[in-house]
Image: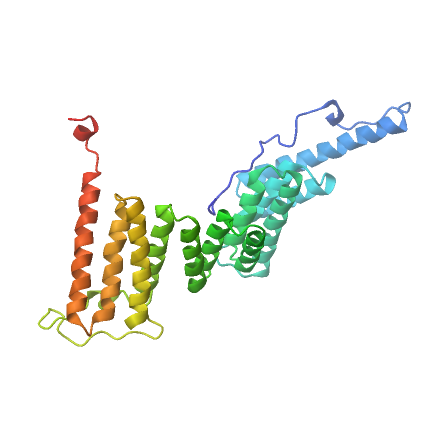
Amino acid sequence: MEPGRLRAYVSADPIFPKTPSMRPCTALAFSLTVVLSAFVGLGCTELRARQHAREGNRLYQAGQYALAVQEYDKAQALHPDLVPVVLNKGLACRQLLVPGGQSKEHQRSVDCALNAFARLQQLRPDDPRGKQLYVQTLFDADRYDRLEAMYLENLKKDPNDRKSIHGLIQVYVRSERWQKALEWSLERARLESSDPEAHYSVGVLIHDRLFQKGGSGANAAFDPRAGAPSDQPPPQFAEGDLQGQERVRLADVGLKHLDQALAIRPGFGEAMAYKNLLLRQKAIAFWDAPERWEEQMNAAESWRKRSMAHGEANQVTPASKHGL
């Protein structure tokens, strides 16, 4: 679930269906027993909680999320474990999050949402929304350390837990711990060796890294051959850019996995496209050997043409759709 306006999960008349114990609170007849008075009192408490929840929903729908949280707090103070209130309070707190926010107020909103979704998991362990919203909030709030610890703990219990491996890769990609992201992407490809997407993702990850570390702009456009239009000194790499044998080594790992993806799914157009792109990234390592640079670029061009031909062949026109 991506950040954005999330609807409240309960209606304007939210908490639970009306029951006889929820009638408006009135003075109790003198003859009622103490036990009966206790039950009627509970009904009055529920009614007041319900009224606060309804007001919270109205404020939520009006976009007044902070005020909505206040009403949900009042409802919880009267009746702590009403599932719709717990859920809607978490959603309202999520709406107060600011991308990249670091203020104390922002952190309080994050904690509010996380506490609500954690409580929802306790109240309704079979409801997937609690876990999904809890994890999404951790991602949205950049709380990568907690996510990492959670996924690693899951993997201690089950080293083949695919969902935790996928989640861990996302944690490392988003937190820019690239080496860890590659390590777990390779582990995913090992465990899911028959899945072309797992191998393809390794190729994409490595291409993006090479592109970011010296593979864009003037470096990508430079032609080292004598007499070429760019017959001038090679561009300069920046500190931290990947070059030489390290660039070749990483490119070859990515190309190997793209080849595996294509062996499993020969018509994998996206893998063809990334073979083209990754070969061009590899070529940058051969500015001092123009013949090898040209070899990589020719191979890249071949894959570019194959990718385009594959895309054109898979376009469905009105005539071909009907076999005409």
Q: Residue at x 59, y 31 (%)?
A: 12
> Colour scheme of this structure image?
rainbow
Tell me if residue 243 can be seen.
no
Quadrant position of residue 268: top left
Quadrant position of residue 86: top right
Tell me if residue 118 can be seen.
yes
Please identify the residue farthest to the left as the structure is shown.
Answer: 227
- Percent position of residue 237, x then y: 28, 74
From the viewer's perspective, tell me whether residue 235 is left or right of residue 62.
Answer: left
- Percent position of residue 242, x then y: 32, 70
Q: Is residue 17 above or below residue 303?
A: above
Q: Residue at x 19, y 39 (%)?
A: 313
Q: Is residue 281 above or below residue 269?
A: below
From the viewer's perspective, tell me whether residue 38 is left or right of residue 219.
Answer: right
From the viewer's perspective, tell me whether residue 99 is left or right of residue 301.
Answer: right
Please identify the residue farthest to the bottom as the structure is shown.
Answer: 233
The quadrant of the rendering that contains the C terminus is top left
- Percent position of residue 70, x then y: 64, 46
Q: Is residue 231 above or below residue 195?
A: below
Which of 324 and 11 lies nearest the eye of the viewer?
Answer: 324
- Percent position of residue 285, x then y: 25, 69
Q: Residue at x 45, y 55 (%)?
A: 169
Quadrant position of residue 57: top right
Q: Residue at x 48, y 52 (%)?
A: 165
Which of 148 and 184 lies nearest the eye of the viewer?
Answer: 184
